[in-house]
Image: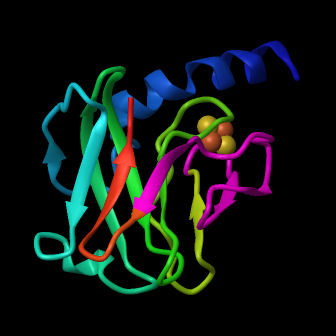
Amino acid sequence: MSGKGLLAASLAPQLAALTGCGPTGGGPTIPHDPSNRYTFDFTTYPELGAAGGVLYAQVEATSGLVPVALVRVSQAAAVALAMICTHAGCEVGTLDPSSKTFSCPCHGSVFSETGAVVRGPAFSPLHQYATQVTASAIVATIA
Ligand code: FES
């Protein structure tokens, strides 16, 4: 990578913040819970009640404000992903419903609905938080 390329990559998160290439998922801001356990019940968030549903939220985690995508990948399983690209820290876009992928606006990385790398330059998956699907909610542990 050239010096200019390296500089651009290292400044991508800051540039993203300045240019508005930042949070795209939006959604509710979830207040900090000292237990790091966040319950997304299906009454409040009906989009999570069935397979295929997605909720975007800004979680006031112990580590700071984290943009999170909760994806109900099946009736029995859900994932909670940090929407921060593992290449250089830009926030990825929302889930494309047709391809079921997240795309990063900065350098084009693409991730599956469970956070796996589909296309680089990122080579690490999106950070995934532990989740549990109950009869009435998805519980995510986000620190
Ligand atoms: S920050 Fe470079 S591809 Fe996402």
114 above or below 98?
Answer: above
Between 91 and 45, the residue placed more toward the observer is 45
Residue 81 in view (yes/no): no
Residue at image x 47%, y 57%?
93
Residue interval drawn in magenta: 105-132
99 sits left or right of 20 in the view: right
**Furthest residue toward right:** 1
Q: Is residue 142 above or below residue 13?
A: below
Specify whether 119 is left or right of 53.
right
Q: Residue at x 26, y 46 (%)?
A: 38
Give the x, y percent position of residue 55. Answer: 31, 66
Q: Is residue 111 left or right of residue 94?
A: right
- Residue 27 highlighted magenta (yes or no): no
Residue 2 x, y percent position in the rendering: 86, 19
Q: From the image, which quarter does the C terminus lie in?
A: top left
Question: Going 17% across and 44% down the picture, which residue do you hit?
Answer: 30
Q: Position of residue 100 (x, y in %)?
A: 59, 77
